[in-house]
Amino acid sequence: MKLVTYEYEGKQAAGVVSPCGNFIYPADALGFAGDTMNALIGCIAGMGVKKGLKALKDAVEKGTDEKIPMDGAALLAPIPHPAQDMICLGINYMEHAEESARYKKEAFGGERPYAVYFSKRVGEAVAPGGEIDGHFDMVERLDYEAELAAVIGADAKRAEEKDAADYVLGYTIINDVSARQIQTRHKQWYFGKSLDGFTPMGPWIVTADEFAFPPRLSIQSRVNGELRQNSNTGLMIFDIPHVIRELSQGITLKAGTVIATGTPAGVGMGFDPPRFLKPGDVVECTIEGIGTLKNTVK
């Protein structure tokens, strides 16, 4: 199933794309809380992820007379306002770790014994087709990062790897837009990745029951049609079960938490010379089984 946040006739709500793809069923018409995606996730979490998704799928199969034409609705980011800062993984693909070290002119030892975690402030996630604010009055080196994001569907506390799938609602695409010189200047990543408009997300959340676990999916990015990143999520250094287990030992991962799992090689800073974004550039992030998230830099 594809879970969406949409706007139609001035109203925003959460819904599910019909199996034919031509309509959106409002979540509340299916018997689920649907004012926001956070409300829908909370409703599913109250049943348990797998039972909740099955109940929602059964409701979708029955259908409803209340449906929104897909071509008349505007898709927003699936979670426009995450309840908490996004959790992100840094240098979680080995080839990206190598290009990052080259860019920073650091020695690369080839070992990553521990995951690198940081958070990203998301005031409002950018919709599919929306604009990336380059903040070029303060940003000189604007970069893109295509990432698979896992959406937590039930509170996870001291979860084990074997049970990690029980906590995943589904997956979406994140473009972890980054201001490289701000990252370097401040010696950490929060500010340089959290400027307004730096989190395109979408086009929807595809529910976890559509994938094997953990998902091993083709991941790509293109800038103005040119292929830049081309990898597979199976090449993560630390996979989703590891991340859920490790973080939940000391942090309760609340339902609705978004975990961006890192980006593969091919970002702008990885080229020689670097190839950073400029106004008018079109960035497309594509993940197998989910779709394409397309945004233009302004």
Image (cartoon, rainbow, N blue to C red):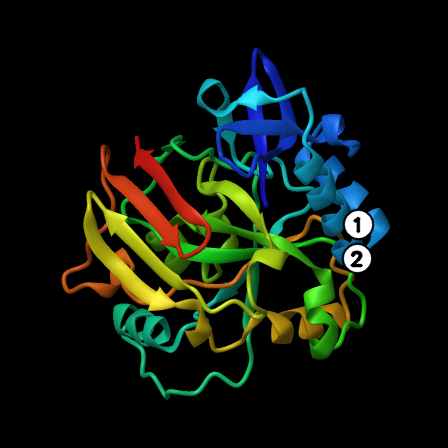
Residue extending farthest left? 273
Q: Are marks 1 and 2 in contact (CB under 8 Å)?
A: yes
Q: Is residue 154 visible?
A: no
Q: Which residue is mark 2?
A: 155
Up-down relation of residue 83 to residue 113 (above or below): above
Residue 45 disc label:
1
Residue at point 52% right, 67% down? 215
- What residue do we see at 56% from left, 81% from top? 114
| Tag of residue 224 | none
Judge from the rendering whether residue 212 lies leftward or rightward of residue 62; answer left or right: left
Q: Is residue 296 left or right of residue 39?
A: left
Q: Identity of the amino acid at label 2?
A: Asp
State the residue in front, 127 or 57. 57
Q: Quadrant of residue 287?
A: bottom left
Which part of the image, by quadrant, shows the C terminus?
Answer: top left
* 273 displayed left or right of 234: left
* Image position, residue 223 (x, y; %): 23, 47
SS at mark 2 in the image = loop
> Which amino acid is tagged 1?
Ala
The residue located at (41%, 47%) in the rendering is: 291
- Residue at the location (44% across, 68% down)? 233
The secondary element bearing badge 1 is classed as helix
Between marks 1 and 2, how big is the CA–CA gap? 8 Å
